[in-house]
Image: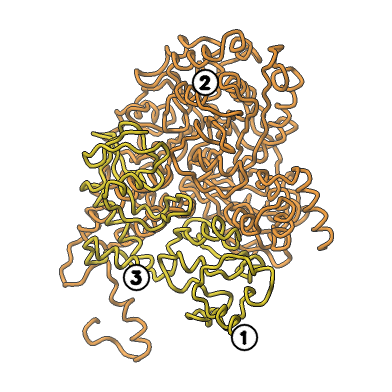
Chain colours: A yellow, B orange
């Protein structure tokens, strides 16, 4: 067991626990976006930053990836943390203003004005879908391409993926948009669009035992009825 | 064609044991063979190494030297670093545009020559410079650019462009390069003569723990810039649990304005490898990797040869120098044009055949590094110092330098100065003295530590070069009278935006916004509150980013705001007419004006 102090409260947790888990165990709220239980820690959105250490050596770290250390002093809501968190949230809001999840978070953090130029992208590159696809669905159908501002995600060559079973896991976990399932034809990117595409799960036996997150899925219901 | 593609790609994969971890080498091989790595090649590689296709595509799209679309037989990569720009790279660029009839990022219609604009290629002291395939071409002028194109069109062999060789080992039959070393001031440690094998012999005569103690006694700190104590790093790694350990040498010298590692690898390769071998002994590692940046590919054959000779002389391989049970060998891992790979966890990702995204820390590489095994990553210069410490003893190393920073430091000085080149100086030297050495006393600003360092104004020329004051990985860029401080900052911000991996929000989104606002201020459309905006946003990026790149990327703006605030203050004006100066009303209503075909009644 490892003992550390979070916001002045001492807590003992098992080795390997993250600061986020320890704080949540004590009931301290920390907002998260790229973090998701069941997926590997990622640390990309930087929303869950907390302050560790003291004096001039105090620094901000992402609590979802930082493991607990003996005697560590953690502050989850210091002025520095809140300022940084607020600005990161503003950056996220600027890059993806239509996301309900981000809007709610911004509202909860009393962001009333947007200082940054808005981008109207539909993705914050939090990587939830990529991890979902690889770690839970074992499909590895989507991944990141490019770097920097040109970083994007999708299937190889933006073509129909041979390994995608259209389970819908990526849409299910996406915090930023409800438009991820553009498939290869954006005009079909509407709810229930998968039914029109005749996904392989209703066509082929090999996918029978596969997990699927589209529940209820129109396609499955149709196939069961017929 | 497609059959030969299939055979060749599969052969390249087999040459690397169809190992997924060697993806970088495989893709480099395919790129070199065909000039591109297309969809079909990616499919074949994915099948051969048994990796998801998306992973291979991910790697290909990450590195600047890989291209999914066909490139010319010859690629001209012109350096767009600030120093090259100051020395007139635009004129050579124009000459290339005119003669080839293409712009940057394009290929001639006959598919022979491609032109690209790339960040610093480590030749700032002989700027403007370009890489033509692997061959560096230095001191370009518009005339020489014309000649290069004319010559290339006749033989298409970049090596033939090298008419005369540079000094030192640059004329070695395995290098044959026109690059000059420009060693202006050799010092008592790094450039001093050294008996080959002596340091390893001394290391092997004492225990690994004593080797680490010697490094600690010498108070050696990492030469890459961050200055972490090398001995402590080694001790962590030695104490960490793991069946295997790795020694990695960071020769991904990407910081603009730095070129000392290039000189070390050319002139003191043996010393670098000796340092790695000593680290291997101290840590109990059997394998070392030299991560060589793609821009220095012209040194590879030579370095491989040095390794072969060392193996022949019993300085590498099994039972080194007769020490039973001490086996150590080194392989060279090529990079492919990504500055971020100089960050140690990115470097490890790249060695593992992944995208060069940094890893989360902790765990630190010393606990869990390459392939999950404890690893140390040190700079080329650090390993040189290790060799010297073991050869002469820690005391003689300690004689040099200042209290917190012992030993000497290599500085790469370039820009507006009379003698650009490499200088070995004692730590603790003042910036003013450094400028005198290079003949840049009239500099109006000096960038210490590259874009991730800081821009220092003349009032701070009395400050000292050492880890506790002005820390630098080696890059010193001098700017003479008439240079525009904001232009410099803009250029560096462009660099960071281009080289960011895009993983975390602050660095990916924030830097673009920083640069935009800076441009608006430079264009005279800023208001006083914009300075606070830059400061706030910059500080947030600095504190919340995930890796060293993000944490230093706002420095060009933060340090100019601090040291050259008057430049900003002259440009900003308070808003008087009720409109934000940053908001361009005429651009905003431009479309409406076009549609209606008349001017605005309110905004004339």
Residue matched to label 2: B385
Q: With B338 as the anchor, is A42 left or right in this view?
A: left
The structure residue drawn at horizontal position 58% and vertical position 32%, both measured from the top left corner, is B248
Q: CA distance from mark 1 to mark 3?
A: 36 Å
Q: Are marks 2 and 1 in contact (CB under 8 Å)?
A: no
Residue matched to label 1: A226
- Of residue B38 and residue A34, the one placed in the foreground of this image is A34
The structure residue drawn at horizontal position 20% and vertical position 48%, both measured from the top left corner, is A79
Q: Secondary structure at mark 3?
A: helix
Which label number is shown at residue A100? Answer: 3
Q: With B504 as the anchor, is B124 left or right in this view?
A: right
- Of residue B383 and residue B432, the one placed in the foreground of this image is B383
The N terminus of chain A lies in quadrant: top left
Mark 2 against mark 3, which lies toward the viewer?
Answer: 3
- Of residue A59 and residue B28, the one placed in the foreground of this image is A59
Crowding at label 2, few (<14), some or many (≥20) Cα neighbours within 10 Å? many
């Amino acid at each position: 067991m490892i003992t550390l102090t979070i916001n002045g409260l001492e807590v003992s947790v098992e080795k390997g626990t993250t600061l986020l888990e320890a704080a949540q165990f004590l009931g301290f709220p920390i907002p998260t976006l790229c973090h998701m239980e069941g997926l590997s820690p990622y640390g990309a959105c930087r929303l869950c930053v907390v302050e560790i250490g003291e004096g001039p050596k105090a620094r901000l770290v992402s609590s979802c990836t930082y493991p607990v250390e003996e005697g560590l002093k953690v502050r989850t809501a210091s002025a520095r943390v809140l300022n940084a968190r607020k600005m990161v949230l503003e950056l996220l809001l600027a890059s993806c203003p239509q996301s309900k999840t981000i809007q709610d978070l911004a509202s909860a953090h009393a962001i009333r004005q947007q200082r940054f130029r808005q981008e109207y992208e539909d993705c914050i590159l939090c990587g939830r879908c990529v991890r979902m696809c690889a770690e839970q669905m074992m499909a590895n159908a989507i991944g990141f391409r490019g770097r920097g501002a040109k970083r994007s995600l999708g299937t190889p060559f933006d073509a129909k993926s041979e390994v995608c079973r259209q389970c819908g896991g990526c849409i299910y976990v996406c915090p930023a948009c409800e438009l991820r399932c553009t498939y290869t034809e954006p005009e079909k990117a509407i709810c229930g669009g998968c039914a029109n595409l005749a996904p392989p799960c209703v066509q082929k036996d090999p996918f029978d035992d596969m997990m699927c997150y589209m529940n209820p899925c129109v396609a499955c219901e149709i196939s069961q009825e017929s | 064609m497609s059959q030969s593609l299939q055979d060749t790609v599969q052969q390249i994969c087999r040459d690397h044991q169809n190992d997924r971890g060697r993806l970088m080498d495989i893709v480099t091989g395919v790129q070199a063979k065909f000039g591109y790595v297309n969809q079909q090649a990616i499919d074949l590689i994915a099948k051969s190494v048994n990796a998801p296709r998306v992973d291979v595509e991910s790697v290909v799209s990450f590195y600047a030297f890989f291209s999914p679309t066909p490139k010319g037989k010859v690629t001209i990569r012109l350096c767009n670093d600030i120093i090259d720009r100051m020395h007139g790279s635009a004129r050579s660029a124009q000459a290339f545009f005119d003669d080839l009839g293409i712009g940057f990022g394009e290929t001639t219609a006959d598919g022979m020559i491609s032109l690209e604009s790339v960040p610093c290629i480590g030749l700032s002291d002989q700027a403007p410079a370009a890489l033509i395939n692997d061959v560096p071409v230095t001191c370009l002028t518009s005339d020489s650019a014309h000649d290069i194109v004319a010559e290339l069109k006749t033989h298409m062999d970049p090596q033939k462009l090298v008419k005369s060789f540079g000094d030192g080992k640059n004329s070695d039959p395995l290098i044959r390069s026109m690059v000059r070393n420009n060693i202006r001031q050799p010092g008592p440690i790094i450039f001093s003569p050294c008996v080959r094998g002596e340091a390893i012999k001394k290391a092997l005569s004492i225990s690994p723990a004593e080797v680490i103690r010697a490094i600690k006694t010498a108070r050696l700190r990492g030469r890459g810039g961050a200055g972490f104590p090398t001995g402590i790093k080694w001790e962590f790694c030695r104490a960490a649990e793991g069946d295997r350990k790795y020694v990695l040498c960071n020769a991904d010298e990407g910081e603009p304005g730095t070129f000392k590692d290039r000189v070390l690898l050319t002139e003191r390769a043996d010393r670098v490898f000796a340092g790695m071998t000593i680290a291997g002994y101290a840590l109990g590692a059997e394998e070392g990797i030299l991560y060589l940046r793609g821009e220095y590919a012209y040194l590879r054959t030579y370095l491989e040869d040095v390794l072969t000779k060392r193996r022949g002389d019993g300085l590498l391989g099994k039972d080194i120098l007769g020490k039973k049970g001490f086996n150590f060998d080194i392989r060279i891992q090529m990079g492919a044009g990504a500055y971020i790979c100089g960050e140690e966890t990115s470097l490890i990702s790249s060695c593992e055949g992944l995208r060069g995204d940094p890893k989360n820390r902790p765990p630190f590489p010393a606990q869990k590094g390459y392939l999950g095994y404890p690893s140390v990553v040190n700079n080329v210069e650090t390993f040189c110092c290790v060799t010297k410490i073991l050869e002469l003893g820690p005391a003689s190393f300690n004689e040099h330098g200042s209290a917190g920073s012992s030993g000497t430091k290599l500085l790469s000085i370039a820009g507006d100065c009379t003698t650009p080149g490499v200088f070995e100086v004692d730590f603790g030297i003042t910036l003013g003295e450094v400028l005198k050495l290079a003949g840049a006393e009239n500099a109006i600003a000096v960038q210490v530590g590259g874009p991730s360092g800081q821009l220092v104004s003349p009032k701070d020329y009395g400050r000292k070069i050492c880890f506790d004051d002005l820390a630098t990985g080696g890059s010193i860029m001098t700017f003479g009278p008439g240079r525009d401080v904001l232009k410099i900052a803009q250029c560096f911000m462009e660099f960071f935006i281009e080289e960011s991996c895009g993983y975390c929000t602050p660095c990916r989104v924030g830097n673009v916004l920083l640069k935009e606002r800076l441009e608006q201020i430079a264009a005279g459309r800023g208001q006083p509150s914009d300075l606070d905006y830059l400061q706030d946003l910059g500080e947030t990026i600095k504190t919340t980013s995930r890796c060293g790149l993000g944490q230093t990327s706002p420095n060009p703006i933060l340090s100019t705001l601090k040291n050259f605030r008057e430049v900003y203050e002259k440009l900003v004006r308070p808003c008087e007419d009720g409109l934000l100066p940053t908001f361009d009303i005429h651009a905003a209503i431009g479309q409406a004006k076009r549609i209606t075909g008349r001017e605005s009644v309110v905004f004339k």
